[in-house]
Image (cartoon, rainbow, N blue to C red):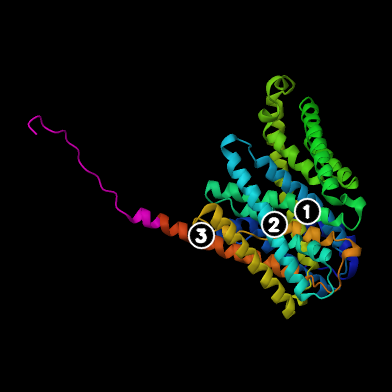
Amino acid sequence: MNLFFLAGGSFFEDPYSLIIAASAIIILSFFFNQISKKTNIPSVLLLIILGIVLKFGLDASGVEHDFFPTLEILGIVGLIMIVLEAALELKLEKEKMIPILLALGLAVVGLIASTWIAKLILQYFISDITNLQAWVYATPLSILSSAIIIPSVADLRADKKEFHIYESTFSDIIGIMMFYYLLGNVDPSSSGSGWLAFTGNLFLTIFIALLSSYLIILIFQNLKSHVKLFLLIAVLLLLYAIAKKFHLSALIIILIFGLVIANMKLFFPGKMKKYLNYKKAIHIYEELHIITLETAFVVRTFFFVIFGLTIVLSTLMDLQVALISILIIASIYIIRFVMLRIAFGKDILPQIFIAPRGLITILLFYAIPVELQLESFNSGILLFVIIGTSLIMTGAMIFDKRRSEKSVKKAEAVPVGYLKWKPKSLEE
């Protein structure tokens, strides 16, 4: 690792050192994923810790660099890849409609309730915060992190795993829409002010998303080039960026494209089937799924390591930060307990504790416009909530895994008996 810590700014001018560092980080991230599978410690948490350790090394070596522009770009690309990855997993089948709608309802209720309580907490402790600022700062703290949840629930029971994938994906999408709707109340040109403009924005985005999804599939299924998948990703990134420039709900375009290509038979019914070459289109879907997984892994790796590099640990030493953060975290799980208890009854473990905050929380926090930024808001609250919710989820997943292992061992320990059967005699 000494190669990473070159003195002064020469590190960032040496391409070979950058290649060595980037390669080492990706290799470590792969091992973190393996550790996560065995221990249920989120790999994201390990990546943040790695970034903090690297920060100490860079500070000791006198290396100075502004990581925030890189963090923002990685965050945007990571967000697109994560939503696309989740959308490609969603199969819109009749028997799954009730679980999907239930997850959607819980995501909406949980997001709004958590944001409102967090807003009240911030207003109580921060005297100079306005009502709008409180809503804007509370929203990122209330969004579930699909970047952490989706890789972490792989070993859960199938129905619980699906619930978390749906819920975290919906929380991401709706949370981002809610955040930019709030920003529209500051600058009407950013996303439109008022519910009418917001609804018009939403329907326009859905129309563009469906139209572009059909066009992409119909065009790309007929391309004979072998290098079309990254071209497809480039088109999606282009659509996202253009939609953002026109202040549309850009992430919906990514979500709908993923849903359309993952459920082509549903979106190409009746006479529309003749326009779809299903064999070629499904081949694109399968390859896109693999590339999306790989790209999301790499982008997520560098995003959280760089986030670790930007962390100022001294902010965690503030007692007010700790108190605000603990109250926000407590409200998250109280709201979650009430919702899940009503929806699922007593079978709410470990779901109640799977509510980490992560990539989107960080990304939206840095997207708060200058006119709404508040100097008295301590960014340590952000870090405290992210780490706190991740550790709570880790503990719950470890407990659930041990509980499952005990149940299996107990079942295996019960001797299996057998009875020798013989037919009854005619005399009996």
Q: Per the image, is 415 magenta?
A: yes
Q: Is residue 226 above or below residue 420?
A: above
- Residue at the image point whose x is 70% and y is 57% from the top: 111
Labels 1 & 3 near each other (Cβ < 8 A)? no
Q: Earlier in the sequence, mark 2 or mark 1?
A: 2
* Residue 365 falls left or right of residue 342: right
Separation of marks 1 and 3 at Cα, in angstroms? 33 Å
From which residue to which does the magenta span run? Answer: 409-428
Q: Is residue 242 above or below residue 324?
A: above
Where is the C terminus found, in terms of image quarters?
Answer: top left
* Residue type for callout 1: Met
Q: Quadrant of residue 234?
A: top right
Q: Along the line of sight, which residue is nearer the eye, 13 or 408?
A: 408
Labels 2 & 1 near each other (Cβ < 8 A)? yes
Q: Along the line of sight, which residue is nearer the eye, 204 or 313?
A: 204
* Image position, residue 406 (x, y; %): 42, 59
Where is the N terminus found, in terms of image quarters?
Answer: bottom right
Q: Per the image, is 140 magenta?
A: no
* Residue marked by disc 1: 178
Q: Residues within 10 Å of mark 3 (few under 14, many from 20)?
A: some
